[in-house]
Amino acid sequence: MNTQDSRVTDEDVRKLVVARLHSFPAGRKISIGADGEFTKDELIERVEKDDRVGKKIVEIQLSYLQSLKEQRFMEE
């Protein structure tokens, strides 16, 4: 029996989002509504700081990944 804790922490999620952000094209800016435009590096910094914009990026990324998962199950 595996006794390792398999729960995903907030830090794990932030690391995943940062890894996804690293794959974004350099030189592009992403608009976050009224919060303004951010470069890839600025978004990574915000996610690592876990500020309001960083939390919004995490929420957006998790929503995107969840939609991919749901679409995959619908196709099966």
Image: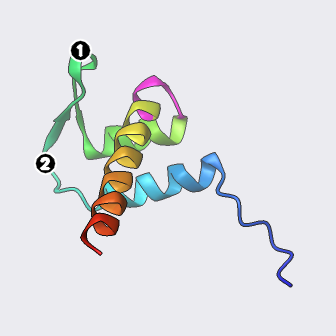
- Name which residue type carries label 2: Gly
Label 2 – label 1 distance at C-alpha = 21 Å
Q: Is residue 44 left or right of residue 33?
A: right
Q: Locate the C terminus by quadrant.
A: bottom left
Query: In the image, is residue 46 part of the stretch drawn in magenta?
Result: no
Q: Residues within 10 Å of mark 2 (few under 14, many from 20)?
A: few
Most frequent secondary structure within the magenta stretch? helix
Q: Residue at x 36, y 55 (%)?
A: 65
Q: Give residue 73's position: percent from left, percent from top.
A: 34, 67
Q: Is residue 14 left or right of residue 61?
A: right
Q: Residues within 10 Å of mark 1 (few under 14, many from 20)?
A: few
Q: Give residue 58's position: percent from left, percent from top.
A: 43, 41
Q: Residue at x 62, y 46 (%)?
A: 10
Disc ID at residue 27:
2
Q: Which residues are magenta?
A: 50-54
Q: Give residue 54's position: percent from left, percent from top.
A: 43, 34
- Name which residue type carries label 1: Ala
Residue position for label 1: 34
Q: Is residue 8 left or right of residue 22?
A: right
SS at circle 1: helix
Q: Pointers 2 and 1 in contact (CB under 8 A)?
A: no
Residue extending farthest left = 28
SS at circle 2: loop
Q: How is the image coloured?
A: rainbow
Q: Earlier in the sequence, mark 2 or mark 1?
A: 2
